[in-house]
Image (cartoon, rainbow, N blue to C red):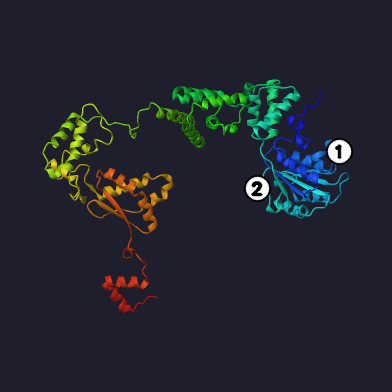
């Protein structure tokens, strides 16, 4: 029986031109070989399975090739190339630093570096996973790495460059390998499938490429696994079944339900997904990715960011045309929040279901949902006949000509409410709603209205001297409560200001005005920025549109200064006669 070789080894590149997805690096290395400008130490770093060790081997073979081809490619015909391909070359030494990371291993390598090559110009040492070397091994290697023999070249490979000592990095030319792009992986898988006689669907290869996460070795390993499962016919259904990948059909159907605000059907689709063995975090992460793909599908400029097969791309564009950007961005935010909370959630299924309900609610709020009460189009229901008659009766006494202007406030409100057909808007009945049928009960320490405001004439018209329209009596305690409530309502980015406000207490200045004293101009400027919103908030809370608040910086004489010990003693003696007698009899003095 013929020995089976996995695709990752069988199709390992042997020339620079066959390396996939690292064009810039391979061109640089070929040019260095062609011009003879070779460094003594190289560092190849990047994610797993992107060709670091492969490029190191090709580079080692190429610099020892006796008849290099155009552009620095090895000829594959000379004795040096043949010995390398047959794994019998003594000029190329590979060391796995993960298992040979001691000082003794590095000393053995240094001893080998002193011997010149048998065939070719250079002796090349490839140290894989170099970040696994111990600190002592690194220190033992430093001098040789900095000034090696003229015939030695060191190539270090690692997936974790940040773990290397700065002294190592400074001695190497550094080449950063990038992750493979999905189209590059798909193209290489097509080549491997054609070479092995495997039939495939492009969508299936695209799923394999996405699952590989930028690593060609992972992609080839997954490809071998799927070929074994599907019997040589790699289809999309076989791939998602073998790899336990959630079918994108579910996301298309679910998005259609969310766009229709169909919450029951959305929950049924999620239940079906759970029944197939997928967990909620996998599902919500895939939904966020699907919404992101729809968002980038809306514009031609961002369409290249969509890593799907051409046959699926049209479906994304069609569904994206029916989605508004605001819906997609809000859905991504909801899914992201759900994914972040998933690990700590007690009822994980309920958490995902709430996220689906909130996403469906985005469309309900945008279309036919009833107004929330804060909408400018919301209308208040008509007042009851008893309230309308009460207001009309209050407006009957004729006011003197000089008071005609202020009394128009009540008259206009009455005329608007008495109309049979139109419904009053949210702002028009405001004065009428604040007419008080009985006198305000007395309160202690009440901030009363001075009676200078023009709107008080309307109250006089009703012949109720102490009643005010929109001028309920309030105390300084009410203002302080509104002050704290406003601080609690500030957004997260203004938490520092909120805490500062909670440490300040407004004081009564006059009948309608409270005063806040601050320590410096910075706080004063911040409060002045918030002043319009703050005054409106306080007026609403205390139900009085004359309520006001002012800010000022504390005067110098108001500040508490630090007293010296002598000043403290003098103050104590002034207040206490027995202490004076004690000091005189004992002749006490400050030390």
Q: Is residue 568 visible?
A: yes
Identity of the residue drawn at 70% across and 24% down:
227
Instruction: Tell me the crowding category of disc 1: few under 14, some 14 to 19, or many 20 or more residues within 10 angstroms, Cα based.
Output: some
Identity of the residue drawn at 49% across and 28% down:
323
User: x, y percentage for residue 211?
Assistant: 63, 31
Question: Do the residues bearing badges 2 and 1 touch, measured as CB atoms within 8 Å?
Answer: no
Quadrant of res 175: top right
What residue does disc 1 label?
83
User: x, y percentage for residue 363?
Assistant: 43, 28
User: x, y percentage for residue 16?
Assistant: 76, 37
Query: In the displayed structure, would residue 540 be above or below residue 168?
Result: above
Apparent side of residue 325 relative to residue 556 in the rendered image (left or right): right
Apparent side of residue 474 relative to residue 169 in the rendered image (left or right): left
- Secondary structure state at the residue bearing disc 2: helix
Identity of the residue drawn at 29% across and 31% down:
379
Q: Is residue 95 visible?
A: no
* Residue nearest the viewer, comparing 153 with 158: 153
What residue does disc 2 label?
162
Query: In the displayed structure, would residue 575 be above or below residue 153?
Result: below
Instruction: Tell me the crowding category of disc 2: few under 14, some 14 to 19, or many 20 or more residues within 10 angstroms, Cα based.
Output: few
* Residue nearest the viewer, comparing 66 with 209: 66
In whole angstroms, how far apart are the C-alphas of marks 2 and 1? 35 Å
- Secondary structure state at the residue bearing disc 1: helix
Quadrant of res 87: top right
């Amino acid at each position: 029986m013929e020995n089976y070789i996995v695709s990752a080894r069988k199709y390992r590149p042997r020339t620079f031109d066959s390396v996939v997805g690292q064009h810039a690096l391979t061109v640089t290395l070929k040019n260095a070989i062609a011009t003879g400008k070779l460094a003594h130490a190289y560092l190849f770093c990047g994610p797993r399975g992107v060709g670091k060790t492969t490029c190191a081997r090709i580079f080692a073979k190429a610099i020892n090739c006796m008849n290099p081809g155009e552009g620095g490619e090895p000829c594959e015909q000379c004795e040096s190339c043949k010995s390398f391909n047959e794994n019998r070359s003594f000029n190329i030494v590979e060391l796995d630093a993960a298992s040979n990371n001691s000082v003794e291993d590095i000393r053995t390598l240094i001893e080998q570096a002193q011997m010149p090559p048998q065939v070719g110009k250079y002796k090349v040492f490839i140290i894989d996973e170099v970040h696994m070397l111990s600190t002592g091994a690194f220190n033992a290697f430093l001098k040789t790495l900095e000034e090696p023999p003229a015939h030695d070249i060191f190539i270090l490979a690692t997936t974790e460059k940040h773990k290397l000592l700065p002294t190592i990095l400074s001695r190497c030319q550094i080449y950063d390998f990038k992750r493979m792009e999905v189209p590059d992986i798909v193209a290489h898988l097509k080549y491997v499938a054609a070479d092995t006689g495997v039939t495939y669907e492009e969508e299936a290869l695209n799923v394999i490429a996405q699952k590989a996460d930028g690593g060609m070795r992972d992609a080839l390993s997954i490809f071998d696994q799927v070929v074994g499962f599907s019997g040589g016919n790699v289809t999309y259904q076989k791939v998602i079944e073998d790899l336990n990948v959630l079918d994108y059909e579910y996301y298309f159907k679910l998005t259609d339900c969310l766009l229709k605000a169909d919450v029951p059907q959305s929950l049924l689709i999620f239940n079906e997904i759970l029944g197939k063995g997928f967990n909620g975090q996998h599902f919500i992460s895939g939904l966020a990715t699907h919404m992101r793909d729809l968002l980038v599908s809306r514009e031609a400029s961002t369409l290249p960011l969509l890593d799907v097969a051409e046959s699926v791309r049209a479906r994304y564009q069609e569904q994206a045309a029916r989605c508004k950007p605001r819906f997609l961005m809000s859905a991504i935010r909801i899914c992201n929040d759900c994914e972040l909370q998933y690990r700590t959630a007690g009822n994980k299924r309920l958490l995902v279901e709430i996220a689906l309900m909130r996403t469906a609610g985005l469309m309900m709020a945008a279309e036919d949902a009833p107004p929330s009460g804060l909408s400018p189009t919301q209308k208040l229901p008509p007042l009851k006949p008893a309230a309308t008659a009460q207001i009309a009766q209050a407006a009957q006494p004729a006011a003197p000509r000089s008071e005609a202007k202020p009394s128009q406030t009540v008259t206009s409100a009455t005329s608007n409410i008495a109309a049979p057909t139109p419904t009053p808007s949210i702002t028009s009945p405001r004065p009428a709603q604040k007419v008080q049928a009985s006198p305000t009960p007395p309160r202690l320490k009440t901030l009363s209205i001075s009676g200078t405001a023009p709107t008080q004439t309307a109250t006089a018209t009703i012949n109720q001297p102490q009643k005010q329209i929109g001028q309920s009596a309030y105390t300084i305690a009410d203002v302080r409560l509104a002050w704290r409530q406003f601080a609690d309502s500030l957004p997260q980015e203004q938490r520092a200001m909120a805490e500062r406000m909670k440490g300040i207490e407004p004081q009564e200045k006059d009948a309608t005005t409270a005063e806040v004293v601050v320590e410096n101009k910075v706080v004063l400027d911040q409060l002045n920025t918030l002043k319009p919103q703050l005054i409106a908030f306080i007026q609403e809370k205390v139900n009085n549109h004359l309520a006001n608040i002012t800010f000022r910086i504390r005067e110098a004489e108001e500040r508490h200064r630090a007293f010296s010990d002598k000043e403290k003693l003098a103050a104590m003696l002034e207040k206490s006669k027995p202490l004076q007698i004690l000091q005189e009899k004992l002749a006490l003095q400050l030390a």
